[in-house]
Image (spheres, helix red, strand yellow):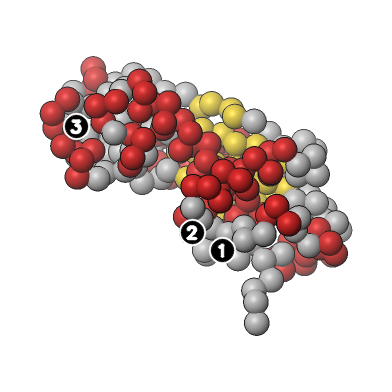
Amino acid sequence: MSLDLLAFERELWQQGLTRVAGVDEAGRGPLAGPVSAAAVILPPAWAKSGLPLELAGLNDSKQLSDTQREGFYEFIIGCAEVRHAVVLVEAGRIDTINILQATHEAMNSALARLTPAPQHALVDGRPVKTMRVPQTALVKGDARSYSIAAASVLAKVTRDRLMLEYDRQWPQYGFAGHKGYGTAGHLAAIAQHGPCPIHRRSFAPLKQEEPEWFQGGKTKIVG
């Protein structure tokens, strides 16, 4: 039997909660760049009609090709029936409050950007204690809920595109290839050139580096 990836949404929609937001993040683990979080509200009408053909195959963004992610991203942000928001929390902020709190801040900010406000959130992973709306936490939720999968795509594509911009700004680190993760090539580049302003100084092996290499960060709203 195929998994019903609208089952959690449908149950809430049947309770009269028509604004159910899927929430997911991208970029918790890298040594550089922001953490990204997205919130997506799909229309309850899709419970009967099913997903549009343009979203056939929507899944956890990590299981999709770059081409698939880009296609889904463009459809989601261009679909008038879908509400969405993406928030980036930059490296300096991550270093100040830690990556877990920065991720939760990004999730809450993304939810706060949705208008009208969501009535319930489906969250990938563990419960978020600071979340300001009722929530259902789903382990591996990006493979169990279309709303979370859509948020996963928006969060990852937004972050990946930004890392391509950073690659043009600091080409010596190879951000276009590894997106800030701690690959052997990335670690070698840090050893050769030292860290740049988007590196997370609180992350090993960077936490012993001199702070003057870094600049303060901020929370950025996207979409």
- At which x and y percent is residue 23? 61, 49
- Quote the CA–CA distance across marks 3 and 1: 34 Å
**Relative image position of residue 133 (x, y in whole percent):** 68, 48
Numbered tag placed on residue 132 in the rendering: none
Name the N-terminal-most of marks 2 and 1: 2
Which residue is label 1 attached to?
143
* 63 relative to 77, above or below: below
Q: Position of residue 152 (x, y in %)?
A: 56, 50
| 67 and 143: which is toward the camera | 67
How busy is the neighbourhood of tag 1: few (under 14 within 10 Å), some, or many (20 plus)?
Answer: many
10 Å neighbourhood of mark 3: few (<14), some, or many (≥20)? some
x then y, percent, for residue 34: 43, 34
Label 3 secondary element: helix
Q: Which residue is mark 2?
A: 63
**Residue at image coords 46%, 30%:** 162
Res. 3 image quadrant: bottom right
93 and 154: which is toward the camera: 154
Amino acid type of the residue tagged 3 in the rendering: Ile
User: Element type at marker 2?
Assistant: helix
Marks counted in the figure total 3
Report the quarter where the N terminus lies: bottom right
Kindly indicate the quadrant of the structure image that contains residue 33: top left
Using the rendered image of the protein, determine whether residue 132 is visible from the camera's viewpoint: no
Which of discs 2 and 3 lies nearer the camera? The answer is 2
Q: Are marks 3 and 1 in contact (CB under 8 Å)?
A: no
Q: Are marks 2 and 1 in contact (CB under 8 Å)?
A: yes
- Image quadrant holding the C terminus, namely top right
**Which residue in the structure is indicated by mark 3?**
190
Callout 2 environment at 10 Å: few (<14), some (14 to 19), or many (20+)?
A: few
